[in-house]
């Protein structure tokens, strides 16, 4: 798959989202390719770390490609969010440690993937958010919302979602979401290499136990939310916003 480059470098499997002209917006095929990469990371003995990053220096991932939403209704929205949850959970459940290397925009589905990783390193110019309240008028699943709450807390998560603003790297670093902040892409390469080296030298079962415990605690008692997703994706606002986006126009919200 040309839009997703998967290659082993030393003890790490690197997955690069490679659609720089589209700010690395993800197609459904790219989501599935990431799922397959997680399977490979767990299956091959020589792989000790999984690294995700974006090509082009402008974005990690800018979200899901808007073209994927053409013709959506409420049921399609539920199916879409279930698809994303399947990939996010597979990434969380990867046996080896996972690392998101962020340089640029980390938006929407990209933020969910970064949040599903165990560690995140970002450049100072990176930006994080889910600005759907001013763009598409869709919503997050309960799963993704819970993931963001676990990392950012309810106040910051609601501020990000309701005001549809992007958080800068300093904010998310202060919140603990980004574990290491670097100056630029060169510093990112160095930090990723150093982190991969450290993780590869540590006890695999100790790291797996820590990962598994954190994931189980986060998922415990997670409620259903398909009714929320179905209402929003089935709305006239969402259909109109998808159409407006393709025409590069701002949507007009009606609340229906």
Image (tube, rainbow, N blue to C red):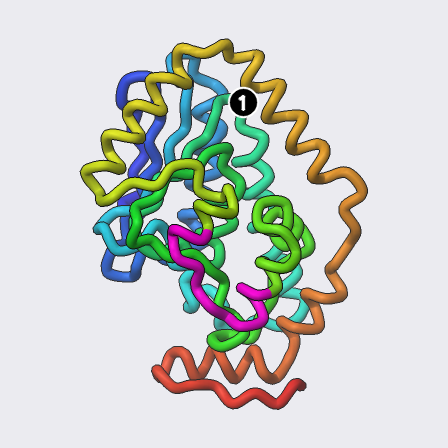
Q: Quadrant of residue 23?
A: bottom left
Residue at 44% across / 59% down in the picture? 167
| 126 left or right of 236 in image | left
Residue 111 or residue 31, whichever sits in front: 111
Q: Which residues are magenta?
A: 159-171
Q: Compared with residue 9, is residue 102 higher up or lower down, i.e. above or below?
A: below
Mark 1: few/some/many CA within 10 Å (<14, 14-19, 20+): many
Q: How many marks?
A: 1
Image spot of residue 107 (x, y percent):
43, 58
User: From this viewpoint, which residue is outermost toward the left?
Assistant: 186
Q: Is residue 71 magenta?
A: no
Residue 230 or residue 140, whichever sits in front: 140
Q: Secondary structure at mark 1?
A: loop
Q: Which residue is mark 1?
A: 95
The answer to whether any part of residue 16 appears in the image is yes
Image spot of residue 212 (x, y percent):
64, 25
Image spot of residue 19 (x, y percent):
28, 53
Residue 216 or residue 18, whichever sits in front: 216
The quarter in which the C terminus is drawn is: bottom right
Q: Compared with residue 24, is residue 182 higher up or lower down, i.e. above or below?
A: above
Residue at 49% across / 37% down in the picture? 117
Q: Quadrant of residue 15?
A: top left
The quarter in which the N terminus is drawn is: top left
Residue at 22% across / 42% down in the picture? 185
Q: Compared with residue 111, is residue 232 higher up or lower down, i.e. above or below?
A: below
């Amino acid at each position: 798959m040309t839009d997703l480059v998967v290659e082993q470098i030393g003890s790490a499997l690197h997955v690069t989202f490679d659609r720089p002209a589209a700010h690395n917006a993800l197609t459904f095929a790219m989501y599935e390719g990431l799922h397959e990469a997680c399977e490979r990371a767990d299956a091959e003995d020589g792989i000790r770390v999984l690294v995700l990053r974006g090509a082009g220096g402008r974005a990690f991932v800018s979200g899901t490609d808007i073209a994927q939403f053409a013709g959506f209704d409420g049921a399609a929205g539920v199916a879409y969010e279930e698809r994303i949850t399947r990939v996010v959970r597979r990434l969380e459940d990867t046996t080896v440690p996972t690392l998101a290397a962020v340089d640029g925009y980390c938006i929407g589905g990209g933020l969910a993937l970064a949040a599903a990783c165990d560690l995140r390193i970002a450049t100072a110019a990176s930006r994080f958010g889910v600005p759907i309240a001013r763009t598409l008028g869709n919503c997050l699943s309960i799963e993704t919302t819970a993931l963001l709450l676990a990392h950012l807390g309810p106040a910051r998560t609601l501020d990000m979602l309701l005001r549809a603003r992007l958080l800068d790297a300093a904010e998310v670093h202060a919140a603990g979401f980004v574990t290491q902040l670097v100056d630029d892409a060169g510093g990112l390469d160095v930090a990723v290499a150093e982190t991969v080296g450290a993780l590869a030298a540590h006890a695999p079962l100790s790291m797996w136990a820590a990962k598994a415990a954190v994931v189980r605690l986060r998922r415990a008692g997670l409620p259903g939310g398909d009714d929320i997703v179905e209402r929003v994706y089935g709305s006239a606002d969402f259909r109109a916003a998808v159409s407006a986006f393709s025409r590069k126009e701002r949507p007009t919200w009606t609340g229906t």
